[in-house]
Every structure is written in C-alpha cells, then in structure tokens.
Image: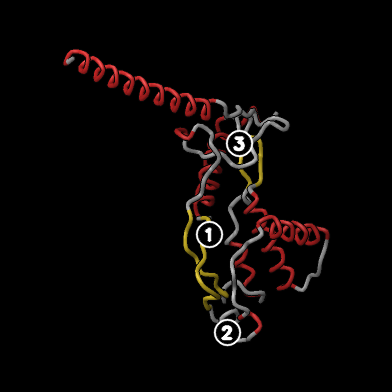
C-alpha cells in the first residue's frame, strides 16, 4: 500500500513537470512565431512598414513604441502669429524637415508628425507675412484636418477658449490651457530623426561616388 501511494505521488509529480514543460514549449513557440513572422521589408516599392521601426537592433524591426508623458497644453507667447515669431517657428522645425533614410538603399521617407509640424509652420508664416493661401497651404489644411479626424482625441476640455483671459489667450503671456493629458513623448522622435540624419551624412561621405552616378 505504501509503495503504491509513493508510485502515485511520483506519477503526479511527473505529470505536473510534463505539463509545465509543455506550457514552456508552447510559450516559446508563440514567442518565436511572433518575432520571426515579422515581414522582412526591402524598402523597395510598397515593401516598407506602416510605422517607423524601433532603431534598437534588439527590437528586431518591431514598430516603435513611444513612452507617454503628462503634458498641459499652453497658449505660448513665443509661438504667435506675429512677424517677429516667424524665426521661433522656423528654428523649431526638424533639421531636415523630418525626412529620414531607411533601408539598405537609404530610401527617403517623411515622418507624419514632422509633416504636420511643417504645415503648422506654413500656417504661422502665412499669417505673419499676410501672404495668403496657395496650393501648399491648401494641401496642408486638408492634411492637418484629416489627421485630426484620424486621431479623434477623446480628451474632455472646459470651454475656456470662449473667454478672453481665461488661460487660452493672455495678451502675449504664456498660460497653461486646461488640465494635463497623456501624450506620446515626441522628443524621442526628434532624437531618432537626428540620429538618422547623422548616419545619412556619414553614409553620403562613404558612398559619394556611387551617389553621384
């Protein structure tokens, strides 16, 4: 009887260990399938990812995930529509307008955030110089409009913009406009864009003759 009880105990332990082993194998298979099934993009034609990949080699080309930050919108005095503010808008743009070179052939792409920022700069410059609208402004108005619809920001806001002096407009003084919200940390994209352009400058020098053909 004692021998039988001990055998059953060993059998149960064996079954538990076997089950644990199978679970580990299953998890490992799912993990490998997820990481190895990611398509290998050539960056030729339509073969490129919808989102910029993480530049960290350890991420194996996974889509870039930006951390979140708490941010309160501001009615900035520096970024106004006055002619004197045009330079502030200009120097805040990405160095190469947000263009990046990706893939073995260094194909050029624009990052959507920088495209939108470029459009906002054009709006500010047009208002500051009273230059009126043109085809570029027309494109940007529609581009920004559709991106606003695409994002469909669900944040609740108090209607303070209707009251002059409520925080949205303070006669040339920067004021916080509304409560904090969770935002993507855009500074990470700026760093990636800078690193990419530094790498592109090195690549250009190393392949000067090839690129000149």
112 or 133: which is nearer to us?
A: 112
Label 3 or label 2, whichever lies nearer to me, is 2
Cα separation, mark 1 vs mark 2, equals: 23 Å
Marks 3 and 2 in Cβ contact (< 8 Å) = no
Q: Label 2 crowding class (10 Å Cα cut-off): few <14, some 14-19, many 20+?
A: some
Q: Quadrant of the N terminus?
A: top left
Residue at (63% x, 86% y) in the render: 164
Which comes before the other along the chain, label 3 or label 2? 3
| Secondary structure at numbered mark 2 | loop
Q: Label 3 crowding class (10 Å Cα cut-off): few <14, some 14-19, many 20+?
A: some
Q: Which residue is mark 1?
A: 183
Q: Label 1 crowding class (10 Å Cα cut-off): few <14, some 14-19, many 20+?
A: few
Which comes before the other along the chain, label 3 or label 1? 3
Q: Which residue is mark 3?
A: 102
Please state the horizontal and vertical placement of residue 22, each as a whole percent of the image: 40, 22
* Identity of the residue furthest to the left in this view: 2
Res 160 quadrant in image: bottom right
Residue 71 circle label: none
159 or 14: which is nearer to us?
A: 14
| Secondary structure at numbered mark 1 | strand
Residue at (45% x, 24% y) in the render: 26
| Secondary structure at numbered mark 3 | strand
Q: Quadrant of the C terminus?
A: top right
Label 3 or label 1, whichever lies nearer to me, is 1
Res 167 quadrant in image: bottom right
Above or below for 139 versus 158: above
Cα separation, mark 3 vs mark 2, equals: 46 Å
Q: Is residue 124 left or right of residue 22?
A: right
Residue 166 circle label: 2
Cα separation, mark 3 vs mark 1, equals: 26 Å
Marks 1 and 2 in Cβ contact (< 8 Å) = no
112 or 195: which is nearer to us?
A: 112
């Amino acid at each position: 009887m004692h021998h039988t009880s001990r055998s059953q105990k060993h059998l149960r332990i064996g079954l538990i260990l076997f089950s644990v082993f199978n679970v580990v194998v299953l998890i490992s298979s799912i993990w490998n399938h997820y990481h190895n099934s990611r398509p290998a993009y050539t960056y030729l034609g339509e073969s490129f990812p919808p989102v910029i990949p993480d530049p960290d080699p350890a991420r194996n080309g996974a889509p870039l995930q930006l951390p979140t930050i708490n941010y309160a919108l501001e009615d900035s005095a520096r970024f106004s529509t006055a002619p004197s503010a045009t330079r502030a808008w200009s120097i805040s743009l990405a160095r190469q307008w947000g263009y990046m070179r990706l893939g073995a052939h260094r194909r050029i792409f624009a990052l959507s955030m920088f495209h939108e920022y470029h459009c906002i700069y054009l709006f500010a410059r047009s208002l500051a110089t009273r230059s009126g609208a043109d085809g570029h402004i027309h494109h940007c108005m529609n581009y920004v409009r559709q991106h606003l619809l695409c994002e469909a920001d669900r944040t609740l806001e108090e209607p303070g913009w209707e009251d002059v002096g409520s925080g949205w407009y303070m006669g040339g003084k920067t004021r916080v406009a509304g409560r904090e919200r969770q935002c993507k940390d855009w500074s990470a994209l700026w760093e990636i864009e800078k690193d990419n352009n530094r790498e592109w400058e090195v690549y250009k020098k190393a392949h000067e003759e090839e690129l000149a053909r």
